[in-house]
Amino acid sequence: MVKPATQVKKLEVRDLSIRYGDEIALHSADFDVYENEIFGIIGPANSGKTSFLRAINRMNEMTPGMNVTGMVKFDGIDVKSWRDVYALRSRIGVVFPLPVGLPLSIYDNVALSPRLSGVKSKSELDDIVERCLTRAALFDEVKDRLDSLGSLLSGGQQQRLTIARALSQSPELLLLDEFSIAVDPVTTMRIEDVLKELKKEVTIVLVSNLVAQARRLADRTAFFLGGELVEVGETEELFRGNVQDSRTTDYLEGRFG
Amino acid sequence: MTSTKVELAHRASANAAALYRGRAWWVDRVAQGVVFLGGLSAIVFILSIFIFVAKEGLGFMVADLNIKEFLTSPEWRPTEDSPTYGILALMAGTASVTGLAMLIAVPFSLGAAIYIGEFATGKTREVLKVLVELLAAIPSVVWGFIGLSIMNPLIMELFDVPVGLNVLNAGVILGLMAAPIMTTIAEDALKAVPDSYREAAEALGATRWQVIFKVVLPSAKKGLVAAILLGVGRGFGETMAVLMATGHAINLPTSPFDSVCAMTATIAAELGETAQGSPHYQVLFAIGISLFLITFVINMAADVFVRGGLRMRSKKA
Ligand SMILES: Nc1ncnc2c1ncn2[C@@H]1O[C@H](COP(=O)(O)OP(=O)(O)O)[C@@H](O)[C@H]1O
Ligand SMILES: [Mg+2]
């Protein structure tokens, strides 16, 4: 894979630890995510991947008992020092493992975030909705029924709707958490193509349950295991066996996890 | 050789299984039957009540009652020599009291439900829920008593009016009565909204209030309308507290300080004094039928509103 064009740091993770009560979910992680790269995170279940994503946009504040120490810098500023957490979140798009089509119309699903941030003009909203649905490869399928319920779409369509909704806030950073878990293979491939396109404009952190998906998409990949960041490296190098820790190769080759 | 034998035996038992009805099948059948009987009995009870009321009042309504006078005249004089049966004042009494009650109960109960469902956590939440349920269990005669002995003098003093038994009194009492059960139903509706909706909205940068107003309340719309309807139904149907707090005087109310007379209270107060089968007796049943029709129409309207809601919204979009 090509090296990221720029080496501007979008995220700087420093000595980041995440605990739930006494249980440790991520232990002292250190790494950077560069602008306009797809940064893959792989690892078996309960490795702390989701917890890491939640620490970035401070979703931990909604989870009682979740405690984050160390720091994540977003554009060079510690996310904890953002006074307005809502402004922080509106610059970061999130796609959850299970699609969440809000029980609003398809149009309103995508227009929700722009409306929240004060966009009122109908033509402007129309533009945003069409653009985001198109970029999420969904527009052609739903353009004749934008007013029907988003929660009635199929799983794969809802996941693309979720992506369109995440794009509607023009995020600089897109966090995807095992987006393909409830999506058929064809739709998965379409979304992967979308992500490759999007990379030109946004930085993407892709948590994936599929090692092969990380290989297809990620420029660099981090391997999490049981709350430990085992290593970070160029994806292709890791797959070639240039690893610092033999457990990485074991996982990539399916010997555990 | 042996393996073919085993296979054949297997196949034979599989064939036998196709003809045999196991225990699970029978249990399933019996359960179906019981549930069906349960559903059927509900329908039978409702139908027989309806038939009884219709038998007592409907014939009279169609044959002898002057429907125009019934609905448009405020003169309710059932015991005079030439009686007039106008229920306009009674309907106005019921409507004004229920309307005022909803004006009080809807914001209170929705506010309480939002607080309990979306903000309160842990102990606070549990305690509040128990308290609300306790409030819902207060019998209506106790509320009537509060209306008579606490609200009555309070209103007379605060507003300097000669009587404190009026629309205001009954509306407040009825509002307080209806609010707890409305809160419980509304809170259930909010709880039924999956957390993933809230999380998705918060991830978009929505504030707490935006999450509630843009996502949670619209998602819970059906349940919330049901909660309000339950309150309206309670208002229309409530008898004892209303009888005690309205002053029970026939009036077309023009201010909250007018005493009024509600449809239900009229039936309760007068039915015992009428001879069974007399015109007065029958016209009271006609009032019952009207109450039933009004409630039915309100329910239908709400149903149409809930269903049509999305279509209207999307036209805008
Ligand atoms: N809300 C929570 N409360 C308590 N423990 C949690 C919570 N969420 C996750 N955990 C724990 O944190 C660890 C990491 O979980 P998670 O970040 O979801 O891992 P992954 O996404 O890699 O599967 C797990 O051991 C899990 O049990
Ligand atoms: Mg996870």
Image: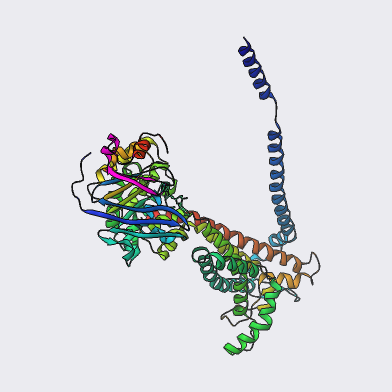
Which quadrant of the figure has residue B5?
A: top right
Percent x, y of residue A143:
33, 45
Residue B79 in sight from this viewpoint? yes
Percent x, y of residue B43:
69, 50
Which quadrant of the figure has residue B243?
A: bottom right
Which residue is at the front of the view, A38 or A251? A251
Q: What's the residue at 61%, 13% (across, down)?
A: B3
The C terminus of chain A appears in which quarter of the rendering? top left
Percent x, y of residue A94:
35, 52
- Left or right: A31 as drawn, with respect to A151: left
Residue range corresponding to the magenta coloring = A220-245
Residue furthest to the right = B275
- Left or right: A58 as drawn, with respect to A4: right
Percent x, y of residue B10:
64, 19
The N terminus of chain A appears in which quarter of the rendering? top left
- Magenta residue check for A151: no
- Left or right: A172 as drawn, with respect to A227: left
- Left or right: B196 as drawn, with respect to B105: left
Which quadrant of the figure has residue A123?
A: bottom left
- Magenta residue check for A222: yes
Residue B301 in sight from this viewpoint? no
